[in-house]
Amino acid sequence: MKVLVAFLIWCLLFVLSWPVAILALVLFPFVWLLCLPFRLLGIAVGSVFAFLKALLFLPARLLDRRPARV
């Protein structure tokens, strides 16, 4: 669905100003490559926070007396 919306917005931009639409089409891969390290950094930071959360809640999970959830 996101791809369809993006395509429709690009088509609208193409109708309104075709040079800007072609420029956006050409520059998109470069912008994606520029943003890739930040995405990887976000994944790494999210993983560290998930690990720390699991580590902090481990004693509570070990001392929990309720039966296991199915």
Image (spheres, helix red, strand yellow):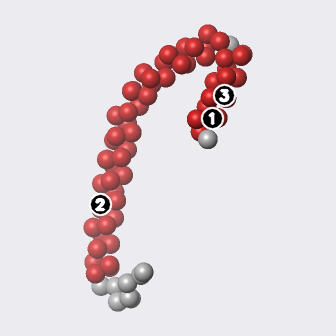
Q: Position of residue 36 (x, y in %)?
A: 38, 33
Tag 2: residue type? Phe
Dot 1 or dot 3: first in sequence order is: 1
Marks 1 and 3, how far apart at CA: 9 Å
State whether residue 55 is above or below residue 26.
below
Q: Residues within 10 Å of mark 2 (few under 14, many from 20)?
A: few
Local packing at callout 3 (Cα closer than 10 Å; few below 14, some 14-19, many 20+) is: few
Which residue is found at the position 29% from the left and 60% from the top?
51
Q: Which mark is residue 24?
A: none
Residue underneath mark 1: 4
Q: Residues within 10 Å of mark 1 (few under 14, many from 20)?
A: few
Dot 3 amino acid type: Ile
Which residue sits furthest top?
A: 19
User: For residue 20, what is the image quadrant?
Assistant: top right
Question: Dots 2 and 1: beta carbons under 8 Å?
Answer: no
Decide which of 47, 9 is in the foreground and name it. Answer: 9
Query: Which residue is disc 3 drawn over?
Result: 9
Image quadrant in which the C terminus is located: bottom left
Q: Is residue 12 above or below residue 48?
A: above
Query: Picture coordinates of residue 18 (x, y %)?
Result: 65, 12
Residue type at numbered disc 1 = Leu
For label 2, the residue is: 51
Relative to residue 60, is residue 32 drawn left or right?
right
